[in-house]
Amino acid sequence: MSDDSATNAVTVSKPRRGWRWLRRALAGLLALLVVVGIAGVSYQAAASAADRRNHPPPGMLVDVGGHRLHLWCAGSGGPTVVLESGLGGFSYDWNYIREDIAGFTRVCAYDRAGYGWSDPVQAPLSSGEVAEDLHDLLTGGGETGPYLLVGHSAGGVHVRSFARLFPDEVAGMVLVDSSNENQGIRMTMLEPLEKEQLSSLKACRLLSPLGLMRVLKVHMVPEDAPIGAEAKAAWLGRMNQNSFCGTAVREYQAFQADIRQTTPPASLGNIPLVVLTRGRDISLDELPPTEGVTQETLDDATRVWLELQEELAGLSTNSTHQIVPDSGHYIHWDQPSIVLEAIQAMVASVQP
C-alpha cells in the first residue's frame, strides 16, 4: 500500500471516531436528562400528594356539572357575602377578613375551577361561564340569595357577569380595585408586561410537573399577606400542584377577551354599589422588570385606571367611590378594615 493510501486511511478514520464519541456523549446526556426528569416527576408527585394530605379542603366540594368546586362558608344571617378573587387567586386570599365577616353575616369564599381545591377543566372559561359555575355552586351548596357580591380585580368582572345573568339574586356589590371590561383596549401601554406575565406562566406550566417550581421556590406567598401561617402553607401547597400553572395560562388568555370589550360594562341599575380603588400609584417596585415598561408608562396606566374606576362607580345610580390611601392593588391586605367597613355597611343597608 502506498504512503498516500495509508494517509487517506488515517484521515477517514479520525472523523468516524469523533462522531462515535459525540453520539455517545449525546446519548449519555439524554439518559441523564431522562433520569433527572423521572426523578423530578416522582418528587413532584410525592410532594403534591403530601400537600393534599396535610392541607385538606376546609370547605366542601360541590359538583357543578362535570367538575367539582370548593365552597367554604361560615357565619349566619343575611345577605350572604360571596367573595370572588382576582386572577390566580382562590379562597385563602380572603382568609383574614373572611372570619370577621362571619361575625356579622354569612360569608362564602370559593375556588374557581383549577385553583385551590377545585377540579381543573381543560377549556378556558369566559367570565359568563365563571358566573354560571358560581351560581351552580351556591345552589348546589344549599346557599340562598340574594347575595352581596365582593369582587377583587378580575373578580369584579366576574361578579358583574353574575349580576347580568342573575339580577334578582344580587342584593349589592363591593368592587375591590376591580378590573374593567374596557381596560384591555385603553391600557395598551401595559401590553409588554402582559406578554411577559403570560410567558412566565407558560414556563411554569412546563416546569411544574418536573418539580422545578418547588425546587426553585418560585411560588413564594408574599410575606405581607395577612392570611396566617397555616393559610400560607396551604396556599403554597395548592399553587405547587401541577394544575395551577395550566389553569393560570388558560384563565389569563380567556380574561384578555373579557377586558377587551368595545362596549361599556353593563349597567347595574340601582343595585347598591361601593367601588374601592387603590390609593398608591402603580410603581415599578411592585412589578418584574419588563422591557418597554417605565415609570412614565405606569404613570399613564395609573391615570387611565382611575378613569376606569370612576366609570365603574357610574354603573349604578346608588353608588359610592372611595380611593383608599396607602393601599396597592390588594386593598383587602393593605387596608382590610376599609373593605370590612364597606361590606358591613352594605349588609346593614340592604337588610330588610
Image: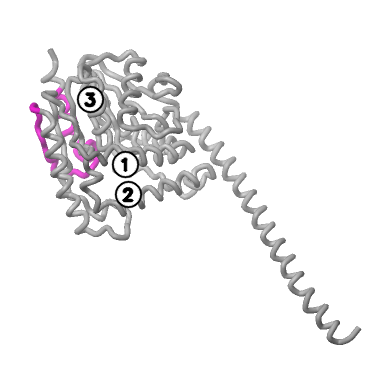
Which quarter of the figure is the N terminus placed in? bottom right
Residue 204 on image: x %, y %: 45, 46
Q: What amino acid type should be assigned to the residue bearing mark 3?
A: Arg
**Amino acid type shown at disc 1:** Gln
**Residue 136 placement: quadrant:** top left
Mark 2 vs mark 3: in front: 3
Crowding around mark 2 (Cα neighbors within 10 Å: few <14, some 14 to 19, many 20+) is some
| Residue 179 appears in the picture as rendered | no
Dot 1 falls on a residue whose secondary structure is helix
User: Furthest residue to the bottom?
Assistant: 3
Q: Quadrant of residue 123?
A: top left
The answer to whether the residues at label 2 and label 1 have Cβ atoms under 8 Å apart is yes
Helix, strand or loop at mark 2: helix
What residue is shown at x 25% (from left), y 51% (from top)? Answer: 188
Per the image, the residue denoted by label 3 is: 164
Q: Earlier in the sequence, mark 2 or mark 1?
A: 2
Q: Mark 3 vs mark 1: which is more N-terminal?
A: 3
Percent of width and height locating residue 282 = 21, 50
**Looking at the image, which residue is at 48% across and 30% down?**
52
Residue 345's place in the image compared with 22, above or below, is: above
Q: Position of residue 151 (x, y in %)?
A: 24, 31
Graded by Cα atoms within 10 Å as few (under 14), some (14 to 19) or many (20 or more), the crowding at tag 1 reads some
* Residue named by callout 1: 256
> Is 252 situated left or right of 7 in this image?
left
The region drawn magenta spans 317-346
Q: Which residue is mark 2?
A: 194
Mark 2 vs 3, N-terminal side: 3
Say the numbered circle drawn on residue 81.
Answer: none
